Amino acid sequence: MARHRQGEEPSNHFRSDRFLLRDGSWYFHTRENTWQGPFSTKRDAGQGLARYLRGVSAA
């Protein structure tokens, strides 16, 4: 069970899946609210996400 600081109300945090399968193709969602893809497999989309994050952190 999570602990909260005195006087703080507990809050719910939701984590959504970054990946979407649509019409047989995989996409990943970015914090910039864009969908990147299409990719043939979810694994390929995961690799695309890793490349994307490396590019963002290098910028």
Image (tube, rainbow, N blue to C red):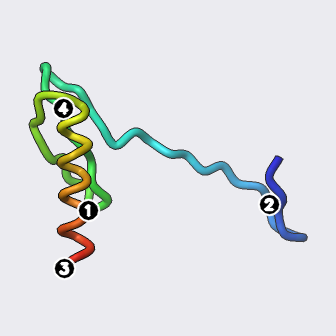
Tell me where residue 37 appears, x and y as whole percent. 11, 42
Mark 3 highlights which residue?
59
User: Image check: 50 left or right of 3?
Assistant: left
Amino acid beneath label 3: Ala
Mark 4 highlights which residue?
26
Mark 1 burial class by Cα count in 10 Å: few <14, some 14-19, many 20+? few
What secondary structure is found at the residue carrying circle 4? strand
What secondary structure is found at the residue carrying circle 3? loop
* Residues at marks 4 and 1, CA–CA distance in whole angstroms: 17 Å
* Residues at marks 4 and 3, CA–CA distance in whole angstroms: 25 Å
Mark 1 highlights which residue?
53
Q: Mark 4 or 3 closer to N-term?
A: 4
- Marks 2/4 in contact by CB < 8 Å: the verdict is no
Q: Mark 4 or 1 closer to N-term?
A: 4
Residue appearing at x 34%, y 43% in the figure:
18
Amino acid beneath label 1: Leu
Residue appearing at x 25%, y 54% in the figure:
50
- Point out the residue furthest to the top here: 24
